[in-house]
Each structure stands twice: as C-alpha cells, then as structure tokens.
C-alpha cells in the first residue's frame, strides 16, 4: 500500500521552513478508519479537509430514489472535503466514506486561515489548492456534458490509474454517470478494438 | 435592462473604505461588446474575470463532433471567467460569448493578487468568491449525475429566473445536457401538471 504523509505533501508544495511544516503537521491530527466507515454523512457539518495518507475515500450523494452518485474518489495524496459545508457552515449534502482501511490527516480549515495571516506563502498555497479544485470540477462538468461514455471511461483510467483494481465496477459506473451494463459494454468494445490492433 | 456596476457589487461585498473601492473600479476597465461577440475563444489565454454590468454571457465548449455544450450563463451581477486558464496560464478550452449587447468590467487577476497583499479583507473576499464558485460547480456536477431532466429544468428556472425569456430553447437544453426534444416534452408535461392543479 502506498504511503504519502501530509508532511511530504506540504514540503513539496509549500515554500516554508521545516519548523512551519512541523507546526502544521503537529496541529493536523490523523485518523484511521475501517473499510465502510464514514468521515462525513449527509446532514452533518464538515469540519475538515481530509488528506489521504493511505487508503481510499469516496464522496457521494443519495438521490430521492435512494440511488448513490459518486462525485469523487480520493486515493493516496488526494484531498477530499465538502468545501461548501466547511466554508459556509452548512449541513452537507454528501457522504465521505472509506472504501479501504484508510488513514487521513485532518486539515483544520480555521487553522489554515489563521496560518494565512501569519505565513504569507500559505495564502498562495491555499489559492493553488482552491484553483486546482475548480479546475477539476470544471473539467468534470465539461466531460459530463460533452464526452461520450467511452471517452469518460478512458479519462477516468488516466486520472485514477489504479482505482479500477480497487473498487467494484458499479462504483466506476456511478462516477461516470452510466449504468453498469453500459460500462460492461464499453469495456468489451475497447478490449475488442485493442485486440484487433 | 438591469444595470449592476462593479462598484455597487464591491461596496456590498467588501469591507473596505470608498477610496479602496474607487482604486479597484478605476483599475478595472469596462468593455462593451455586441451580441455574438467573444470575450474568449478556445485556445486563447483568459486574462480577466468578467463582471457583467449589463447583458448576458455564456461559457461553452465545442466537442470533437462540433457540438456546443453550455457550462454557464452569466447575466447581470454574475462573474464569468476560465479560472483554470487565468490561474495556470493555460490556453482555454472554452468560449465566452455575449448573447446580448453586453458591458463587462474586466477584473485583472494579478491586480487582485497584489491588492490582497495590501488589503487583508481582500483575501477573505477572494476566498469567498472562490468558495462560491466551488459550491456552484459541485452542485452542478451532483445535479448532472443525480437529478432527473425535469428536476434540472426546475432548478435552472430558480437559478436563472429570467433567462428563459432571453435565450433560445436549444441553449437551455444544451445547459441541461438534454436534447431540445426532451426539453420540449418536459415543458409540456409541466404545463399539463400545473394546469390540472
């Protein structure tokens, strides 16, 4: 299993000295949860950003008919959170659940804000995280609107290269916004195309 | 036609004195363009955020088959931009076009960054804009994945109450990710339901 600590992530992304990194890492507690356990449930207030050190998370919603829809997967070194709930202090519309035994670093958003006031390079870092998030969300919308199911599947494999081996097909289909039957057909067609080559 | 100036917007959203507001407004030039004109084309670098003072913009992409997909509409008082292109200095994947004669204030992102260093309340303001953007994008993804076409149409009317009267149905269908025929059917069914009441 891969292992990316928050400390490694910050060192390679933040232009600050080791003392500041230690200060942050010491403040951000880690939490270990089992497969199937939740970090957030619909209706709760999300208080942290979750940096995945080991394991795998998913963020999903449940519609009026009880069907699940996966918005994001977060494997090692990804950050997952409901920024709407954290920032606007609103009950969340989403669930965040571990799909494997998972250890996360709990990033306290208030602490980040306080730090931004003291360490100016933290403003840039936070800005970069937010813009990365926006880029990811905007691409996802464009893809849901404009890409064929096959294109979406191929992009999924590029973005999450090892997740196909870690989650059931029904979850991949949910992320792609297609039925498991369509996903199965796409996989067969791709295998046939590649075999012909 | 409604008229929301950048000055009004900043005064009601930023906790700073009038001198700072004037400083910003003086720096942000306005631009008036005709119906059908572009503020951004695919492949160009987006350099500004566009605050709509009068008129209406749309942001869209064109897929490999030449089909348009509308990601956002921006009527008066909305801000539209390709943050990915601005922030990461990348060629844009999107077009931003005026659907009516439109006047925008050109918000210079570098200027905003410089201002954040001088005026601390600007960091909060910028943070709020980014989080609002994330909230909007996340809800849109969740809706594309989980809501029925009828639910999406009803939410569209709530979010953009007067746009139905300002753009052709084919653009509304493109935003909703459905065919114009499906939109037409949904509208008929809703009219029938409401008439029965």
Image (cartoon, coloured by chain):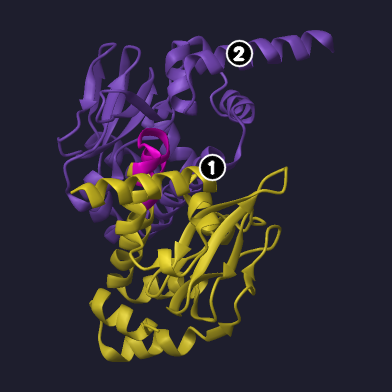
Chain colours: A purple, B yellow
Give how far apart the Cα atoms at labels 1 and 2 are: 21 Å
Q: Give residue A83's position: percent from left, percent from top.
A: 30, 45
Pointer 2 local density, CA inside 10 Å: few below 14, some 14–19, many at least 20: few
Q: Give residue A144's position: percent from left, percent from top.
A: 52, 38
Please state which of residues A117 and B113 is positioned toward the viewer in this rendering.
B113
Residue B46 found in image quarter = bottom right
Residue A149 found in image quarter = top right
Do the numbered discs 1 and 2 sit on residues whose CB atoms are within 8 Å? no
For the point 67% across and 45% down, the residue is B63
Q: In the image, is residue B54 part of the stretch drawn in magenta?
A: no
Q: Which residue is mark 2?
A: A185
Q: Which residue is mark 1?
A: A145
To the question of a shared chain for discs 1 and 2, the answer is yes
For the C terminus of chain A, give its image quadrant. Answer: top right
Q: Can residue A107 be seen in this snapshot?
A: yes
Q: In the image, is residue B142 part of the stretch drawn in magenta?
A: yes
Q: Give residue B149's position: percent from left, percent from top.
A: 40, 40
Q: Is residue B23 above or below residue B196?
A: below
The prevailing secondary structure element of the residues shown in magenta is helix
Q: As drawn, is A115 to the left or to the right of B72?
A: left
Q: Give residue A187's position: percent from left, percent from top.
A: 62, 13
For the point 15% across and 35% down, the residue is A43
Q: Is residue A101 above or below residue B107?
A: above
Q: Can residue A76 be seen in this snapshot?
A: no
Q: Chain of mark 1?
A: A
For the point 62% across and 58% down, the residue is B89
Q: Chain of mark 2?
A: A
For the N terminus of chain A, give its image quadrant. Answer: top left
Q: As drawn, is B132 to the left or to the right of A77?
A: left
Q: As drawn, is B70 to the left or to the right of A69?
A: right
The span shown in magenta is: B136-150
Please state which of residues B107 and B195 is positioned toward the viewer in this rendering.
B195
């Amino acid at each position: 299993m891969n292992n990316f600590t928050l400390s490694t992530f910050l060192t390679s992304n933040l232009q600050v000295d080791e003392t500041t990194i230690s200060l942050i890492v010491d403040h951000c507690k880690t939490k270990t949860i089992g497969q199937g356990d939740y970090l957030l449930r619909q209706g709760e207030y999300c208080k942290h950003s979750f940096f995945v050190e080991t394991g795998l998370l998913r963020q999903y919603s449940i519609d009026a008919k009880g069907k699940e829809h996966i918005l994001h997967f977060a494997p090692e070194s990804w950050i997952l959170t409901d920024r709407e709930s954290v920032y606007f202090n609103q009950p969340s519309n989403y669930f965040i659940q571990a799909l494997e035994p998972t250890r996360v670093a709990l990033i306290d958003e208030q602490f980040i804000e306080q730090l931004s006031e003291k360490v100016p390079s933290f403003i840039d870092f936070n800005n970069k995280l937010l813009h990365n998030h926006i880029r990811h969300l905007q691409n996802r919308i464009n893809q849901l609107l404009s890409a064929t199911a096959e294109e979406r599947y191929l992009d999924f494999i590029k973005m999450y290269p090892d997740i196909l081996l870690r989650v059931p097909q029904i979850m991949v289909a949910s992320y792609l916004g297609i039925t498991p039957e369509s996903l199965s057909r796409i996989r067969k067609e791709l295998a046939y195309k590649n075999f012909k080559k």
